[in-house]
Image (cartoon, coloured by chain):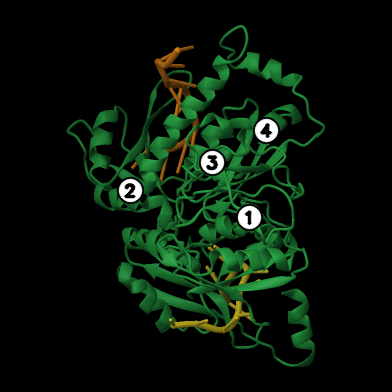
Chain colours: A green, B orange, C yellow
Amino acid sequence: MSNTPQSRVRDYPTNSRLFVICGKGADENAFKEAFGKYGTVEDVWVVKDRRTNEDKGVVYVKMEKTSEAALAMEELNGRKIDNHQGTLKVVVASNKAEGSNRDSREDEKTLRLFVLIPKTFTEADLRKEFEQFGDIEFCNVVIDRNTGDNKGFGYVKYKRPYHAALAFESCNPTFKPKFADPPKSKSERENREMYGDQRRDRSSDRYGGGSNLGASMMDRSPRNRGMKRGFDEELGYGFMHESNQRPSGGPRGGDIMDMLQSYPTASHQTRLQIITAPGLSNSYLAKLTNLVPGLEYCDLNEVTGVAHVRYSNSQCAAYARDKLDGFEYPIGSRLMVRYPEEGSDYGSSRGGGMAGMFPGNDRYAIDDRMSGLGGGGGDDSRERVQYCNIPLPLPQPLRTEDTPVAQRLFIVCQPAAVTERVLRDAFCRFGNLIDVYLLAGRNYGYAKYAKKENAMRAIQNLHGQNLAGQRVKVLEAEPPKSGEGDDFINKKARY
DNA sequence: CGACGGGACGC
DNA sequence: CGACGGGACGC
């Protein structure tokens, strides 16, 4: 129920929307001004009864960033913002589906972070890593009772929501911080195991349906905010251009839907997978995908850059696939739109759709010297991408996680800049990428390919190049550190 | 005292 | 400098 696209978009990033109790007669402009002191106010909504239009005495305020909301909450809770109103109560808004959260632990969700950590981490290590963001109430590392081993995650509780928010936004992204759920009761834990939530969480993370929409460094840079504005203009232009070409002028809304009823497609699928380049936010992707009628769901995992969307029928989905695949955003990168599990024969639709509408793209066929390793046929075009110093091949779909691994690569980089998302965007371009990941709290990671030739092409192209301003190393991985005997066999089979 | 709307206009 | 992920807490 909490998986509606609206709730995901509305409350992203986590804890950025505030619920204010202020009494009747709230002045929207007074709220904009007061909350604007702490950051960018995206929306102020004075709630009124839908029928009677009666003021309900509560206001929602959406801030751009988690930390801005936290600071505004700290500063304005218990204060007045103009002479006509009493004191405000300011809390983080609950999701629509969760309903009122009046009862208990309203501050729990603003102070404590859940973080992934290396198995070697102690509480002192955790504290050392996170105290840079503010005063810590406590840190703990969760230990397996049986083995005594660190289970690979821990908790950090701050004294102030603002400090927790700063850590959430700015810590090394390999920690994958999330605001911790309040501890569950024993009965709730048992339910969780019975219904297998852990498995579901894991697979949805891969496909972007997870709720781990942590902020990344890329999303906060002024440069990328500039890119978003550029995107808006580009978007408007592109679709405008298209509708102007239609016969009998200006189809709108239902007209387009009618036309789409007969849109040719051999597929009956209504879902699409979209791989986005770093820098795209869910709200922008939602606006884009919503320009094709029939959008029911758009859910981008802004950490992984993988989105799932659904349309109300297969014609709409097919139209969206055709028109949005190859759409250029940001400048020099393209969206990749596929049916789920669609094969990696790439290039048949390339250059169609929106792609041709933007002259001056830096896309060109490379010479034989650069493309010579290929052999796999297909498109050998390259494009400039924002985060890399050299042109890269066009994005290609990821293989499913159960695909056998033919070659692993060892990657060294600085994760604060070179996030998993940047790596995924870069490494998928050589084809048959299964997965790429960084280790928690470390500056290295691995990429897994289904074919050795693709892995070798990635080394050839990316080793020693700059990604997000950092020189990266890309080497063939050594076999995993083995225990002995069975253990080794198991690990080898799995990697 | 306490919970979920509506935008838009650019050809 | 750089070698091994995978997400929830004995309340």
User: Label 1 crowding class (10 Å Cα cut-off): few <14, some 14-19, many 20+?
Assistant: few
Q: Earlier in the sequence, mark 1 or mark 4?
A: 4
Q: Secondary structure at mark 3?
A: helix
Compute the Cα span from label 1 to label 3.
49 Å
The residue that mark 3 highlights is A7
* A308 over A392 or under it: above or below: above
The foreground one among A493 and A155 is: A493
Q: Secondary structure at mark 1?
A: helix
* A379 over A59 or under it: above or below: below
* A23 over A73 or under it: above or below: above
Mark 2, mark 4: which one is toward the viewer? 4
The residue that mark 2 highlights is A222
User: Label 4 crowding class (10 Å Cα cut-off): few <14, some 14-19, many 20+?
Assistant: some
Compute the Cα span from label 1 to label 2.
38 Å
Compute the Cα span from label 1 to label 4.
29 Å
The residue that mark 1 highlights is A368
Q: Amino acid at mark 4?
A: Asp
Q: Amino acid at mark 1?
A: Asp
Q: Residue furthest top?
A: A248
Q: Amino acid at mark 3?
A: Ser
**Chain for numbered disc 1:** A
Q: Which residue is rendered at x = 59% and y = 13% of the image?
A: A251
